Image (tube, grey):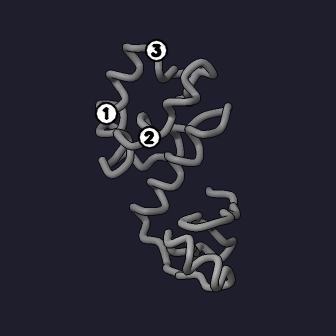
Amino acid sequence: DLTPYLGLGPAAHSLGADGIRRFHLPDIRAYLAAPERVVAEQESEEERLDDLIMISLRRAAGLDLEMIPSARLDTLLKAAAPFLESGELIRDGRFLRVPERHWLTTDAIVRDLMFV
């Protein structure tokens, strides 16, 4: 399950223990004028799964594939195949992780694995 996290600043997203995503609008002037103003939305199961992929691959431990529903696992692994071949992702038992030498490109990897 996802651990709640706090995002600070314009366009930053947070996830509360209640499962509600909160975020600031990306407009810097609006943020400076009212930093307490946030947008809140309940995440769908797909959005929560994409958050899990994004957050997990930004951690050294990586993404626990046992947390991915079987209906999406095959599609995820197909999307991951080019990154596994290039070494940008490593499969370590039940985990997919980004090796330290590729941490700066994690967002590009995550982009191709989300929404599949």
Q: Quadrant of the N terminus?
A: bottom right
Q: Secondary structure at mark 3?
A: loop
**Which residue carries the number 3 mark?**
87
**Which residue carries the number 2 mark?**
110
Q: Secondary structure at mark 2?
A: helix
At label 1, counting other C-alpha atoms closer than 10 Å, the crowd grade (few under 14, some 14-19, many 20 or more) is some
| Horizontal side, residue 97 vs residue 59: left or right | left
Q: Residue at x 55, y 30 (%)?
A: 104
Q: Residue at x 50, y 46 (%)?
A: 53
Could you tell me if the residues under marks 3 and 2 are in contact, i.e. CB atoms within 8 Å?
no
Between the C-alphas of marks 2 and 1, the distance is 10 Å
* Total numbered labels: 3
Q: Nearer the viewer, residue 80 or 35?
A: 35
Image spot of residue 16 (x, y percent)? 66, 72
**What amino acid does circle 1 point to?**
Ala
Q: Nearer the viewer, residue 39 or 30?
A: 30
| Horizontal side, residue 76 vs residue 4: left or right | left
Residue 40 lies in quadrant: bottom right
Could you tell me if the residues under marks 2 and 1 are in contact, i.e. CB atoms within 8 Å?
no
